[in-house]
Image: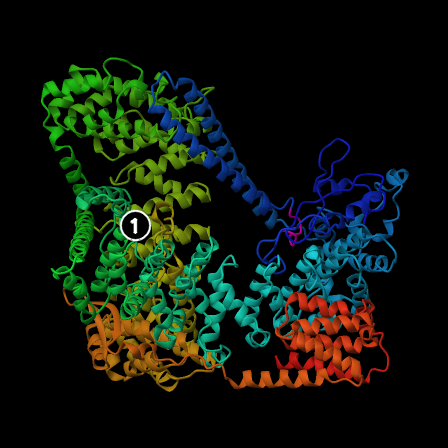
């Protein structure tokens, strides 16, 4: 089908993931016509332009395959819903970020290549190095420019949002900025001679959208036009709906619906697809869906979806049209069972291109309307998709099933609890093809996802943990892919983080090198900053660890350890044997840490393994002895690694600088005692005394000498006075030598900066070194270069050293690191003051256009001393831009985490100074700055002395609202903070707020945190944010008002006076076994968390004693039929076990807790009778609703088979046989016979309706659907849609029967 002739080539838009566009055509000059050309296009070009509006359909692409879109009405990032996607600010910002990310990757690759070239011979790699350095400089320039452009775009967008046009005409011009719509009355003006006449005579801003809609609908009345004409009109209509969002609420459906019916009855697939798209954009609410369904769209959708794959455009839009129902509140109730059946058929069709999106649609329908999917037979299709590897994200299909399993009322829809079996079958079925590995990976993801939620764990307990036993039994299969998959699965389930030396050990390396690896790991961790012991460490137990404990207990009960022993002895490869040994050692370690002693004592002995090791009559003894030795070696290595890290953490907490110095001293102790002869030989080896070419110097040796021998004052004196080593190093650093200052800013060249900082620090440690540094030209030259940026100095330069380009391309930014080292020492501060550099710092902070310079300055400064740098930072926190204020606030975190110094220090310690500044930042006009300050203060308040100091500063947080709430909760944990908040009348208001509603909100917060923590891969932790900010404690118990209140005696007295705890206990007792009302269940869960948080504190013991609430929580954990409620009770019992009194009460009710060697509770509890925790009957599948639905379908089928005409009855009976695999061939022959005889019933809508009713009442495949529909005359559908049938007694009866399954569903 071709378009009508046009005088000019058509305008083309960009590709949208909703619409289909032809290949981009070019203008006369060979360039592609962009979206911006729409504003200047002539009216005579509108018909051509309307064919290809961005996001539209065009029929000349029917031979192209469209990209499969899994979205529902573009809910996953579609661009055709944007009003101005080509020029929107958001898209430009995303484009800038993509380009920055690309350039960063180029920069990293270039730096790695340059580092490799530096290791080669200097002469051989000289030319290559020049090319690489040039490319690196280019990347740095591009990144800097793109970052400036991105920041400018963000600011411009904010200004535009603040200056929205107020007049209707201005608003309308914004709506039509990209591609103004012309009315269809101009479609006939196609003559080239009229272009000039119409170019400026029509103002689109005065066009009425209602008038445009009327003209488009009038244009759709034309008959006999080519298909691209109708597609163009439909595209114009969609664009009109997108530009005028309220227009669809005022549609005259009597006219609009008739036009859409005519469009969707077209013989062209592209026209029908465009019709579905228009209808999708016309949906507003459930009433509009009922109006649309009255247009007989159910029949149209079914006929579209049964078509062959060449009609993909139409089928894809029909499926998107169904998905649009799910976006409307109550829209799932308007999906006819027959439509659900056809979606199930598409999802079950093996070679269907839309199978993935059909499966996703079924999963969403199962969440919204479970009975509809169950009646349509969709549960088995989704269950099969989880295990056969055909769906790209099988683990996401679990959530709808777990949603059904939560409540007993929904659980009856499941057949017998075997819905997850296909995923477990992959581990034990024989390997028949290469596709089995993909299927195995998909099954592994599904099983791992089941082990990441409490409902999933309960589902695994059905049939005496049959799914878990199948996983453990897979360890007895010697197939390499299966064994590897099972080991990976177990590591994921138990959330085991592989030690740093695991890869070397699995590769065959001995464990004797663990000490070096551990030390290396500790040294890497040391650079991440200091931490301190907090008062809440004992309370900050992870819910994830509690969940992992019960998962481990389930696996051990099903023979995990025995299976691992067999897998170790029967490993197909040596690497797998070592990996299995490592897993055995990790399981033993976790059982001793997470499980009660009654569980772990029997496991640590490994009785079966020792029995085999001492059986001298068997040859297997040697393998058993080797396993015992291997496991013991791994255990000792794990233990020593953990001990070394703990010792390091303690030493770092007490005195980080002293510990770092001790490690450095021990590392270079041998070098520090080097005699004069050896030292001179080493200096000669560095090549510093032989050449001034710094690229030939041995920089690792130079750093070794600075950290080692030169610490000795005699050696330092020799390096400064006797030889020229220090002189040449400082000369290399001098800016006007243009060696260091011209060196490219690469990853490899950062060693020059680190060596320079180490040298300056060494010189400042002695009086002679400081005097030598003061007499050198290095510092005054740096000051002169900085003065070039100081507008008050009077010094200027055409090519300043600290220009924006040089800061990004060269190492001049390293001078700020050197100045920061000097700021950390009193002697260095004196040198900076002598050369007036401190004055320059004050002026640089005031610069408005050099954020890069200010950032480099404040980030490299040291603020330990109470001196000028602190004043400079406080100035930067007030006078600079918002981005700089946020950066300056983040710098304070390092110092706010330091312990409060109780001794009186002039000016206060670093921690006191940082906290004061952070409190002042709470009043910043930008909320983002306040939020950063709040997070740092909240983290600092983990230390009780810091908390008391913050309270002493008396911050006012009323203006911050919810942002300041977590910090105020921290104040409650001390008496000082309690009295401060009580004076503000905060406690009473907040207490009433929590009692009346915040408890319910807390349930959502804690469950979201736990789900996020369980979903994360422990092997790939989330990257830490900049400066260690925003530490998300996912999986830990969030701060709770009642827990913080119970930390003090005053808070306990208030809680007792209010009587809230008794109210919570009464609610738990009254509704412990509630299983129907969701609101009541949510209220009970909120009460459970409140009671658990109070009971976790030692001062909360009297509240537990006064009520019998623990007994009822145990009842919920062991007997509740609501799985999520049972899980909440399990976690709450873990909270209660953290207090000594809580442990005693739980022991009375048969629950055992885990303690450490000191007898302190770890917050992990399990019942002594483990089967009680999972005492739940599997789904029976005979729910009354299911039986009623089945009876309704059977009765309906019987009424559909009967007909007054015997031939029609025979046809209907043959259709019924078609669903029976035994009778399929016979039914096909009978139906082909009726087609050959041209039976009269095949021309009548009444029989067609009954046939469609039969197809909706049973599971048919797509080819069978297609065969039955092809039996009927094509005009039958038109008569049904347009309601042209006469005498409709039977027809009306058919229609009423058609509504039966819909209402029943």
Depth order, front residue of 284/1011: 1011
Q: Residues within 10 Å of mark 1 (few under 14, many from 20)?
A: few
Magenta part of the protein: which range? 79-85
Residue at 30% x, 56% y: name it. Answer: 496
Q: Position of residue 854 (x, y in %)?
A: 40, 35
Q: Is residue 645 visible?
A: yes
Q: Is residue 367 visible?
A: no
Q: Main secondary structure of the magenta part?
A: loop
Task: Give the labeled residue for mark 1.
Answer: 573
Taking the magenta stretch, the answer to whether it contains residue 84 is yes
Which quarter shows the C terminus? bottom right
- Quadrant hosting residue 797: top left
Q: Position of residue 1050 (x, y in %)?
A: 25, 72
Circle 1 sits in a helix, a strand or a loop, which is it?
A: loop
Colour setting = rainbow
Taking the magenta stretch, the answer to whether it contains residue 618 is no
> Is 317 drawn above or below residue 525 in the view shown?
below
Depth order, front residue of 801/77: 77
> Is 776 drawn above or below residue 1075 in the view shown?
above
Relative to 69, 430 lies left or right:
left
- Quadrant hosting residue 74: bottom right
Relative to 1142, 613 lies left or right:
left
Residue at 67% x, 77% y: name it. Answer: 1217
Depth order, front residue of 974/452: 452
> Is 1033 drawn above or below residue 854 in the view shown?
below
What is the tally of numbered marks visible in this picture?
1
Q: Position of residue 983 (x, y in %)?
A: 32, 67
């Amino acid at each position: 089908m071709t378009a009508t002739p046009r005088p000019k080539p058509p305008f083309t838009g960009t590709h949208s993931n909703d619409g289909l566009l032809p290949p981009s055509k070019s203008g006369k000059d060979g360039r592609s016509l962009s979206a911006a050309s729409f504003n200047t296009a002539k009216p005579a070009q509108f018909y051509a332009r309307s064919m290809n509006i961005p996001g539209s359909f065009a029929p000349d692409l029917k031979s192209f395959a469209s990209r499969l879109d899994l979205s529902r009405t573009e809910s996953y990032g579609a661009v055709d819903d944007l009003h101005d996607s080509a020029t929107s600010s958001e898209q430009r910002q995303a484009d800038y970020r993509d380009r920055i990310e690309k350039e960063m990757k180029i920069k990293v690759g270039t730096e790695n290549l340059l580092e490799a070239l530096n290791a080669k011979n200097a002469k051989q790699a000289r030319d290559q190095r020049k090319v690489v350095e040039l490319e690196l400089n280019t990347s740095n320039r591009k990144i800097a420019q793109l970052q400036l452009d991105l920041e400018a775009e963000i600011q411009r967008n904010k200004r535009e949002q603040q200056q929205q046009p107020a007049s209707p005409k201005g608003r309308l011009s914004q709506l039509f900025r990209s591609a103004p719509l012309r009315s269809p009355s101009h479609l006939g003006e196609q003559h080239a001679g009229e272009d000039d006449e119409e170019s400026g005579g029509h103002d689109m801003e005065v066009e009425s959208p209602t008038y445009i809609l009327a003209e488009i609908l009038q244009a759709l009345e034309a008959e006999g036009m080519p298909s691209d004409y109708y597609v163009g009109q439909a595209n114009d209509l969609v664009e009109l709906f997108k530009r005028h969002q309220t227009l669809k609420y005022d549609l005259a459906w009597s006219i609009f619906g008739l036009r859409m019916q005519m469009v969707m009855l077209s013989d062209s697939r592209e026209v029908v697809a465009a019709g579905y798209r228009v209808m999708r954009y016309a949906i507003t609410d459930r009433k509009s869906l009922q109006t649309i369904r009255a247009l007989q769209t159910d029949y149209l959708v079914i006929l579209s979806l049964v078509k062959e794959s060449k009609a993909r455009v139409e089928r894809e839009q029909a499926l998107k049209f169904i998905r649009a129902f799910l976006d409307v509140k109550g829209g799932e109730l308007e999906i006819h069972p027959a439509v659900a059946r056809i979606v199930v058929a598409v999802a079950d069709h093996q070679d269907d291109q839309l199978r993935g999106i059909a499966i996703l649609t079924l999963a969403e329908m199962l969440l919204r309307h479970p009975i509809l999917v169950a009646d349509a037979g969709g549960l088995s299709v989704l269950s099969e998709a989880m295990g056969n590897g055909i769906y790209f994200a099988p683990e996401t299909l679990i959530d709808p099933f777990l949603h059904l399993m939560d409540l007993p009322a929904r659980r009856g829809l499941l057949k017998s609890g075997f819905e997850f079996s296909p995923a477990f079958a992959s581990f034990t079925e024989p390997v028949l093809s290469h596709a089995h590995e993909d299927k195995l990976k998909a099954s592994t993801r599904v099983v791992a996802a089941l082990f990441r939620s409490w409902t999933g764990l309960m589902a695994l307990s059905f049939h005496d943990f049959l799914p878990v036993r199948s996983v453990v039994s897979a360890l007895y299969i010697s197939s390499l892919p299966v064994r590897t998959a099972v080991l990976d699965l177990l590591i994921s389930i138990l959330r085991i983080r592989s030690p740093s030396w695991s890869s070397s050990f699995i590769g065959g390396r001995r464990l004797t090198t663990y000490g070096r690896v551990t030390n290396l790991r500790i040294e890497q961790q040391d650079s991440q900053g200091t931490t301190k012991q907090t008062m809440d460490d004992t309370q900050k137990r992870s819910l994830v660890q509690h969940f992992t404990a019960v998962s481990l207990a389930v696996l051990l009960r099903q023979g995990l350890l025995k299976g691992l022993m067999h897998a170790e002895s029967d490993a197909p490869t040596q690497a797998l044997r070592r990996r299995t040994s490592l897993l055995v050692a990790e399981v033993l370690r976790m059982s001793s840490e997470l499980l009660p002693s009654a569980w772990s004592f029997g496991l640590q002995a490994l009785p079966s393994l020792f029995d085999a090791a001492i059986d001298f009559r068997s040859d297997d003894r040697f393998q058993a002895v080797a396993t015992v030795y291997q496991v013991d070696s791994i255990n000792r290595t794990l233990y020593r690694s953990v001990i070394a890290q703990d010792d390091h953490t303690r030493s770092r907490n007490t005195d980080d600088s002293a510990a770092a110095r001790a490690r450095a001293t021990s590392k270079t102790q041998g070098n520090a005692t080097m005699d004069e002869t050896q030292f001179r030989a080493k200096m000669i080896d560095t090549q510093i005394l032989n050449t001034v070419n710094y690229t030939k110097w041995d920089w690792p040796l130079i750093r070794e000498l600075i950290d080692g021998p030169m610490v000795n004052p005699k050696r330092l004196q020799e390096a400064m006075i006797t030889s020229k080593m220090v002189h040449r190093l400082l000369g290399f650093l001098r800016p006007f030598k243009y060696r260091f200052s011209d060196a490219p800013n690469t990853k490899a060249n950062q060693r020059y900066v680190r060596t320079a900082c180490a040298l300056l620090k060494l010189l400042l440690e002695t009086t002679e070194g400081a005097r030598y540094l003061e007499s050198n030209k290095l510092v005054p030259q740096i000051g002169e270069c900085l003065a070039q940026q100081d507008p008050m100095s009077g010094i200027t330069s055409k090519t300043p050293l600290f220009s924006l380009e040089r800061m990004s391309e060269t190492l001049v930014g390293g001078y700020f690191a050197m100045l920061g080292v000097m700021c950390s020492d009193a002697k260095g501060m004196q040198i900076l003051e002598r050369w007036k550099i401190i004055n320059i710092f004050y002026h640089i902070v005031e610069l408005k256009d050099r954020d890069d310079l200010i950032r480099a300055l404040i980030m490299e400064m040291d603020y330990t001393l109470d001196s000028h740098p602190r004043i400079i930072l406080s100035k930067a926190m007030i006078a600079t831009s918002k981005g700089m204020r946020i950066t300056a606030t983040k710098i304070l975190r390092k110092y706010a985490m330091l312990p409060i110094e109780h001794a009186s220090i002039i000016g206060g310690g670093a921690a006191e100074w940082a906290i004061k500044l952070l409190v002042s930042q709470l009043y910043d006009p930008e909320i983002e700055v306040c939020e950063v300050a709040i997070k740092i203060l909240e983290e600092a308040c983990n230390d009780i002395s810091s908390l008391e100091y913050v309270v002493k500063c008396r911050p006012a947080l009323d203006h911050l609202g919810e942002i300041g709430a977590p910090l105020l909760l921290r104040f409650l944990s001390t008496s000082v903070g309690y009295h401060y908040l009580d004076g503000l009348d905060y406690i009473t208001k907040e207490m009433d707020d929590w009692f009346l509603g915040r408890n319910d909100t807390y349930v959502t917060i804690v469950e979201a945190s736990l789900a996020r923590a369980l979903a994360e891969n422990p092997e790939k932790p989330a990257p830490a944010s900049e400066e260690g900010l925003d530490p998300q404690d996912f999986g830990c118990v969030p701060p709770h008002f009642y827990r913080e209140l119970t930390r003090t005696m005053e808070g306990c007295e208030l809680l007792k006076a209010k009587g809230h705890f008794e109210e919570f206990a009464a609610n738990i007792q009254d509704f412990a076994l509630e299983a129907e009302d969701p609101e009541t269940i949510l209220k009970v869960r909120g009460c459970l968390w409140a009671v658990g948080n109070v009971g976790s504190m030692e001062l909360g013991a009297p509240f537990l004693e006064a009520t019998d609430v623990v007994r009822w929580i145990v009842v919920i954990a062991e007997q509740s039929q609501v799985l999520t409620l049972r899980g909440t009770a399990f976690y709450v019992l873990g909270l209660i076990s953290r207090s000594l009194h809580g442990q005693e009460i739980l022991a009375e009710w048969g629950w055992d807790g885990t303690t450490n060697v000191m007898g302190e509770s770890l917050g992990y509890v399990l019942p002594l009778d483990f089967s009680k925790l999972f005492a739940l009957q599997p789904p029976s599948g005979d729910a009354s609703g299911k039986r009623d639905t089945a009876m309704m379908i059977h009765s309906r089928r019987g009424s559909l088979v009967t007909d007054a005409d015997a031939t029609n009855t025979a046809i209907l009976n043959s259709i019924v046989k078609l669903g029976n695999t035994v009778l399929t061939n016979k039914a096909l022959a009978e139906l082909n016979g009726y087609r050959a005889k041209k039976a009269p019933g095949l021309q009548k809508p009444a029989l067609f309706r009954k046939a469609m009713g039969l197809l909706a009442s049973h599971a048919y495949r797509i080819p069978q659907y297609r065969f039955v529909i092809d039996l009927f005359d094509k005009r039958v559908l038109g008569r049904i849609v347009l309601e042209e049938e006469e005498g409709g007694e039977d027809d009306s009866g058919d229609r009423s029967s058609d509504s039966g399954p819909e209402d029943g569903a």
